[in-house]
Amino acid sequence: MRICLKGGRVFDPERSLDGQADLLIKKDRIEAIAPQIKTDDALIIDLAGKVVLPGFIDLHVHLREPGFEDKETIASGTAAAVAGGITAVAAMPNTKPPPDNPAAIRFIEEKAAAAGFCRVYPIGTLSHQRKGGKAADLALLYEAGVRAFSDDGAPVANSRLFKEILQELARYPDAVAIAHSEELPLSAGGLLHEGAVSRRLGLPAVPAAAETIGVARDILLAAATGARLHLAHLSTAGSVELLAWARERGLPVTAEVTPHHLLLTDEEILRSGALAKVNPPLRTEDDCRVLQEALRTGLIDIIATDHAPHRLSEKEAGLEEAPCGIAGLETAVPLLLTGLVNRGKLSLADLVRVYSSRPAELLGLPGGSLQPGAKADIAVLDLEAAGKIDPQGFYSRAKHSPFAGRSYLGGPVMTIVEGKIKMEQGIVYGANR
Ligand code: DOR
């Protein structure tokens, strides 16, 4: 059966496509894009008034399985992804056990294939068992197909070990180290950003320098070794300056920012309490402005959610006890359209660049454009869809968000992965909420 997406605004900045057209899918691939496609054997889907674009690709997602299935599973997390218009995710390795060997990588791939929602690229650990004591068997992981490595959730604190790991990764030009840059002695015990709000509340806090010192160290070690470095979840204006410094020197350093660091400030703790507790913490208006601008100009390469689901009961244990993390897969696109695109801070073309084409390019993945002959990984948006964020409707097991109750204008209404419709009008086929 072929599928004809009819009459939508087909939008792919990579190929300078922006206009009303039909898009024909045959099996798992895009067969054709043309102003009018006539077929007598295709399922016709009328998309007049909707936008058809490359599926979103999220390179920073915590799926929690194995080990923390009470927070999320590979099935529930990938269902949440397609609910959000996302067709591929890279899965962070802070699971129990962490994927530091090929069998653990295969486990994730098999679970993802069995769930059948979106593509999943497992990220391997940098250090053995993600303990920061010695390097993981990077060559074995690379042989198993892993191209991104991280100990995310924590840095490789020992600079000598991190340098050795980067030295080894530098042998593989298509491998990248994803750094969770944090100077732990400075952040230890901190519950929120060190600034006006933490002072008002009298709470232990995380200074901006806890991140910038980490970012500076990681950039310098990348420079010393020639390894590709990707900086995860940047939250401060100072980190952006350091990134610019690295780029000016032609270092192979890329970076990401999350929707919450773009759109929320430390004030959010006053409204949402522990639901807004995240690592790195939400910062200031100024930081948000600098991050938004760096994203627009391409200095920051991509958006990634750092989807970090936790149980509501854990979040309700109080600011001190609660774990860090925000579930972001199902809110990213509506929030980015509402908070950035509709306000002229990012164009729709920028959004496709930072949340689809550039992520695909960074890890050499399929997707990121609507190319006849390529796999049909597609998101359909309704830019007029209006509503309020309602975590009760999430497919993620983490049914809470500091964005709950926020109005949005624009969101995904269909997700197609490898030519199969996975989500339509908010309903994910084969998944339970
Ligand atoms: O807020 C966060 N949550 N930041 C991290 O780096 C890790 C993540 C998690 O795994 O919960």
Image (spheres, rainbow, N blue to C red):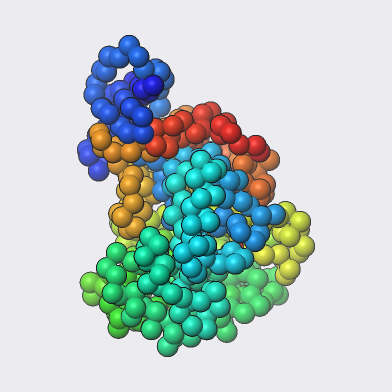
Residue 426 appears anywhere in the view? no
- Provide residue 343's location: percent of width, then percent of height: 42, 43
Q: Picture quarter containing residue 9?
A: top left
Question: Residue at image x 44%, y 32%?
Answer: 420
Q: Picture quarter containing residue 344?
A: top left
Say whether residue 34 is left or right of residue 176.
Answer: left
Residue 197 appears anywhere in the view? yes
Question: Which is more toward the observer, 431 or 245?
Answer: 431
In the depicted structure, whether residue 22 falls above or below residue 18: above
- Provide residue 376's location: percent of width, then percent of height: 35, 35
Numbered-mark total = 0
In the depicted structure, whether residue 417 falls above or below residue 143: above
Question: Which is more toward the observer, 230 or 186?
Answer: 230
Question: Residue at image x 58%, y 75%?
Answer: 206
Q: Quadrant of the N terminus?
A: top left
Q: Picture quarter containing residue 174?
A: bottom left
Question: Residue at image x 65%, y 37%?
Answer: 432
Residue at the far top in the pictured view: 40
Question: Which is more toward the observer, 312 or 430?
Answer: 430
Say whether residue 328 is left or right of residue 212.
Answer: right
- Provide residue 404's location: percent of width, then percent of height: 64, 45
Residue at the far front in the pictured view: 103
In the depicted structure, whether residue 400 falls above or below residue 99: above
Picture quarter with ligand 1: bottom right
- Provide residue 112's location: percent of width, then percent of height: 51, 48
Question: Residue at image x 50%, y 62%?
Answer: 103
Say whether residue 112 is left or right of residue 405.
Answer: left
Q: Quadrant of the C terminus?
A: top right
